[in-house]
Image: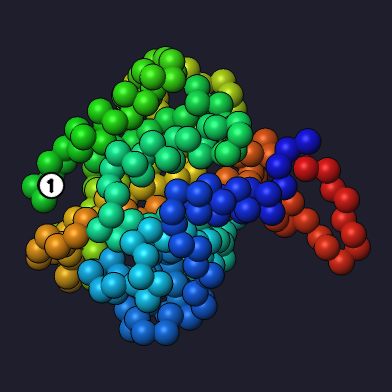
Amino acid sequence: MPMTSTEIRNKFIAFFKNRDHTVLASAPLVPENDPTVLFNTAGMQPLVPYLMGREHPSGSRRLVDIQKCVRTGDIDDIGDNTHATFFEMMGNWSLGDYFKFEAINWSYEFLTSKEEGLGLDPQRLYITVFEGDENAPKDEETASIWREIFEKNKVTGERIYFLGKDANWWPAVKKDTDAWSGPTGPCTEMFYDLTGELNSGMTKEEYLKADEQQKVVEIWNNVFMEYVKENGKIISKLEKKNVDTGSGFERMVAVVQGKESIFDTDVFCRIDAGDKRKI
Ligand code: SER
């Protein structure tokens, strides 16, 4: 019997609570003090002041939450298997505390551990890493942390792909003016093979095709925030580096429950008629 969405929710919170993270409730959907957006579009949105360096009211530098979001930026994708306008985002946060090593190792542990985590098959994981551009170098540090994890856990085959800012920078730095200002940096994304049929060692083109065909789905994004962006340009370095994690809750549930679509999970089961749809 696969884990229910409630069990997944509780496991995520417990995993990071056991690693000294303070548990936060979701902020309201309509931001209280952020004129740049109409809704919270990501878990990081309500935390921007603290990602910029202000001390969090809890006094903690490690936070965990599951934030309700409305995202219209990818509205053209709504109606496929993995996008919803309203969704929840699981996040663990380092405010000037841990950085790449701990964040990546804990991501892997939560995804694959049978005891404390979700017990996903590591041989079905694929990783993307920032390839570098005129703003920031290729993220070799992140790639080598991943290689070490895979080697230690005997996860074979080449499964790390270097991609540009559109895929591996949060949010992408564009040359033209971009309304969003705030903390920014390169990210590493984790994808899961929904089919169980893909072979590690795919070329970058083959991997991108599998992504386009929704054979792999993004389940986790670790952003390593080191810079400040204003009007589409990086203007300075943050005093303290942060980790911003975004993991789409509904997608994670679909992957754990072995469903191709988020709409086939228990998140979307009817409760009025006591729907006993099997998960
Ligand atoms: N900010 C990143 C995202 O929304 C990670 O939380 O994907």
Q: Position of residue 49 (x, y in %)?
A: 29, 74
Answer left or right for 179 relative to 113.
left
Where does label 1 land, which residue?
136
Q: How is the image coloured?
A: rainbow
**Picture residue at 28% right of the left edge, 54% below the top:** 97
Q: Residue at x 56, y 51 (%)?
A: 14
Left or right of 117, for residue 165: left
Residue 172 picture quarter: bottom left
Query: Which of the 4 quarters of the picture holds residue 230?
Result: bottom left
Q: How many marks?
A: 1
Above/below status of 207 relative to 69: above
Q: Left or right of 8: which side holds 94?
A: left
Quadrant for the C terminus in the image = top right
Residue 199 visible in the current orientation: yes
Give the percent coordinates (x, y) of residue 233.
13, 64
Front position in the image: 231 or 90: 90
Disc 1 within 8 angstroms of ligand 1 (CB): no
Give the percent coordinates (x, y) of residue 43. 43, 63
Q: Is residue 71 above or below residue 116?
A: below
Q: Looking at this view, is 49 or 271 the one in front?
A: 49
Q: Quadrant of residue 37?
A: bottom left
Give, as a three-letter code, the residue at label 1: Ala
Q: Residue at x 49, y 67 (%)?
A: 24
Q: Quick check: can you spot residue 173? A: no
**Residue at point 34%, 41% (across, down):** 102
Q: Position of residue 58 (x, y in %)?
A: 40, 72
Q: Quadrant of the N terminus?
A: top right
- SS assignment at label 1: loop
As drawn, 168 above or below 53: above
